[in-house]
Amino acid sequence: MSQPSVRDLHMAKPGEEFRIKDVDPAEVRLPVGKREGKDALKTDRQELVRLQEILYAEGKQAVLIVLQAMDTGGKDGVIRHVVAGVNPQGCIVTPFKVPTPEELAHDYLWRVHKAVPPRRMIGIFNRSHYEDVLVVRVHNLVPKAVWSKRYDQIAAFEKHLAENGVTILKFFLHISKEEQKERLEERLHDPNKQWKFSVGDLKERELWDDYMAAYQDMVNLTSTKWAPWYVIPANRNWYRNLAVGRILLETLREFNMQYPAPKDDLSGIVIPD
Ligand code: ADP
């Protein structure tokens, strides 16, 4: 398939106004259907696996993937489908939950900085420091005077990381409220999915509009040249996975990585019997 840059298709361009209602969560922006899209992801994954191996071998840089979404938005699905097959040794997934007392006693970026992947690794944040301008804002967990300063702080933190060898890819997986209803109903009625259902998710759902406002501000205030947001229409799982995988692939391709030279002079070496 010869195709446009998927980064261009989904990037919230820094400096341009982003309006959440301009993104249709059911949209498919590549000229493919479901079957072709799934096949394309399989092919992409083979290349991803190869490039991750070189990233690991070369050891020069890290990749940080940030996943944010409403409940049922597909963060776990992306982790399962996109990263499937890459060497687990080169990958670290960090979920961010309600902060512990120790975490709360520190500044909110303390736990985040500790989880940033080292060079050679791909780190995936399942939720992230952005919860500190999402759930924290929507529930007034700290005063506005405190959370409103965090956008600039986060942008500065990410700039620091980007200038120190960490390439940051931020994905907002955007589902519609109707789609969330269907997914919650499925969880509620399928005994194999009930473990994922939490009554608390319904309270968050009631706050949908507040969350959308918080997501919109988050994208507008923290989509930067060094760490742009990609807003991925996520009602269709196959498209969500394809788009995220492609953006990761486009990024890794641009690194122009090389396997490192051997540590020793190997000429003339024969492995003894
Ligand atoms: P997930 O929904 O990601 O699969 P959980 O059901 O354990 O995992 O949810 C994690 C919860 O932790 C979410 O409700 C999220 O909003 C909350 N959380 C994460 N970070 C923070 C934070 N900094 N402050 C308050 N709550 C947070």
Image: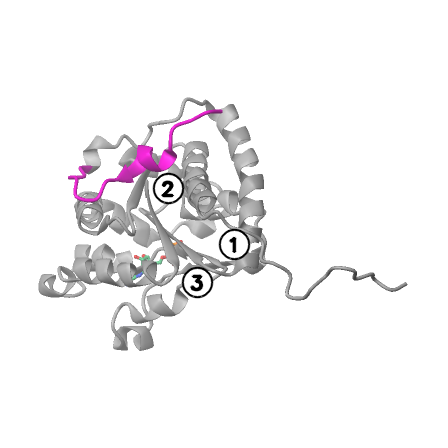
| Disc 3 crowd, CA 10 A, few/some/many (<14, 14-19, 20+) | many
> Could you tell me how far apart the alpha carbons at marks 2 and 1 are, in whole angstroms?
38 Å
Marks 2 and 1 in Cβ contact (< 8 Å): no
Point 21% across, 47% down: residue:
211
248 over 144 or under it: above or below: above
Specify the label residue 117 is tagged with.
Answer: 3
Question: Percent x, y for residue 148?
Answer: 13, 59
Which of 199 and 41 lies nearest the eye of the viewer? 41
> Could you tell me how far apart the alpha carbons at marks 2 and 3 are, in whole angstroms?
32 Å
Residue type highlighted by circle 2 = Leu
Residue type highlighted by circle 1 = Leu
Relative to 265, 240 lies left or right: left
Secondary structure beneath disc 3? Answer: loop
Secondary structure beneath disc 2? Answer: helix
Q: Main secondary structure of the magenta part?
A: loop
Is residue 191 something one can see in this rendering? Answer: no
**What are the residue bounds of the magenta stretch?**
1-19
According to the picture, the residue beneath numbered tag 1 turns out to be 55
Residue type highlighted by circle 3 = Pro
Is residue 10 something one can see in this rendering? Answer: yes
Which of 32 and 196 lies nearest the eye of the viewer? 32
Relative to 186, 206 lies left or right: left
According to the picture, the residue beneath numbered tag 2 turns out to be 184
Which of 178 and 117 lies nearest the eye of the viewer? 117
Q: Quadrant of residue 167?
A: bottom left
Point 82% across, 61% down: residue:
270
Which of 167 and 207 lies nearest the eye of the viewer? 167
| Disc 2 crowd, CA 10 A, few/some/many (<14, 14-19, 20+) | many
Nearest-to-viewer mark from 2 and 1: 1
Counting residues from the start of the chain, the first of labels 2 and 3 encountered is 3
